[in-house]
Image (tube, helix red, strand yellow):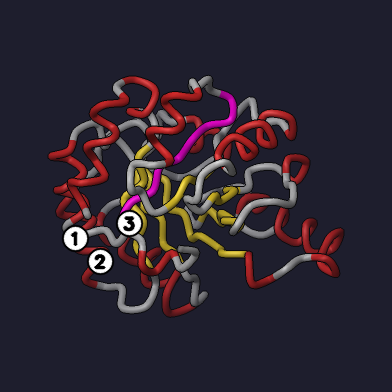
């Protein structure tokens, strides 16, 4: 199912982290709507290809979230392209995107490209450091970014990313109330089925990552919590 607008749950797997074949099989056959392959550091073409090939043995959609031009490879069902709305580094807003289109625009299949408007909230996470994100945001700031994503830039996805810490469900609810067309993704700190269910009430799609490596049984429970 390649239509992300119909998703409720996705697992994000880091190519730079080890996962056994048994664990990967349980993740891919869990009923999740998609496997997103991506991370903030240690991402190489070799480990991206290796993880993609292993996920490809299953029928679940396999998505690449691009963090480096050097690791982009054919073979994924969709490609998620982050633009970090609260970055202070223009590379993460448009410069890298411009470079990619200049170099590869003639061979890009635009039907497979989905742009995500990221808003990174956790100042201590690797993604915030990598993108030089301004995380000193109040509710009004976050709401403005969400509205910009939908009304100004017509982005298909607004991604509220807490990466490693659990966010404010009330804020997620407020963001959702202000979006009518853009799909709201939430990621960060979902370590239990209860937290998955809580955020799943408001976000269109919850993204579950770190808990896969820390507590696989609990990670699997997050699927049924929202579906």
Earlier in the chain: of badge 3 and badge 2, it is 2
How dense is the environment of label 2, judged by Cα within 10 Å: few (below 14), some, or many (20 and up)? many
- The answer to whether any part of residue 136 appears in the image is no
Up the image or down, 135 lies above or below 209; here it is: below
Find out whether residue 151 is within the magenta segment: no
Q: Which residue is mark 3?
A: 205
The region drawn magenta spans 8-16
Please tell me which residue is depicted at 47% across the width and 50% down the height of the picture. 60
Give the foreground label among 3 and 2: 3
Left/right of residue 134 with respect to residue 40 in the rendered view: left
Q: Position of residue 5 (x, y in %)?
A: 39, 69
Find out whether residue 15 is within the magenta segment: yes
Quadrant of image for the N terminus:
bottom left
Q: Position of residue 116 (x, y in %)?
A: 51, 60
How dense is the environment of label 3, judged by Cα within 10 Å: few (below 14), some, or many (20 and up)? many
Local SS, label 1: helix
- Taking depth in this image into account, of 142 and 5 the one nearest to the observer is 5
Residue 123, quarter of the rendered image? top left
Q: Which residue is mark 2?
A: 176
């Amino acid at each position: 199912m390649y239509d992300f607008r119909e998703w409720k749950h996705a697992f994000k797997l880091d190519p730079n982290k080890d996962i056994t074949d048994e664990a990967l099989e349980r993740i891919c056959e869990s009923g999740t709507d998609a496997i997103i392959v991506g991370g903030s550091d240690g991402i190489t073409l070799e480990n991206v290809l290796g993880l993609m090939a292993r996920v490809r043995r299953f029928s679940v959609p396999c998505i690449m979230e691009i963090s480096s031009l050097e690791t982009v490879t054919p073979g994924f069902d969709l490609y998620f392209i982050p633009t970090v709305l609260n970055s202070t580094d223009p590379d993460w807003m448009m410069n890298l995107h411009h470079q990619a289109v200049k170099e590869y625009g003639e061979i890009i299949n635009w039907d497979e490209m989905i742009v995500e408007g990221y808003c990174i909230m956790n100042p201590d996470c690797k993604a915030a450091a990598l993108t030089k994100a301004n995380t000193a945001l109040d509710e009004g700031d976050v709401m403005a970014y969400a509205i910009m994503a939908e009304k100004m830039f017509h982005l298909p996805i607004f991604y509220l990313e807490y990466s490693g810490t659990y966010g404010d469900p009330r804020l997620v609810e407020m963001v959702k109330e202000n979006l009518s067309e853009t799909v709201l993704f939430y990621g960060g700190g979902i370590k239990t089925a209860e937290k998955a269910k809580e955020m799943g009430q408001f976000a269109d799609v919850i993204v579950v990552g770190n808990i896969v490596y820390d507590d696989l049984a609990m990670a699997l429970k997050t699927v049924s919590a929202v579906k």
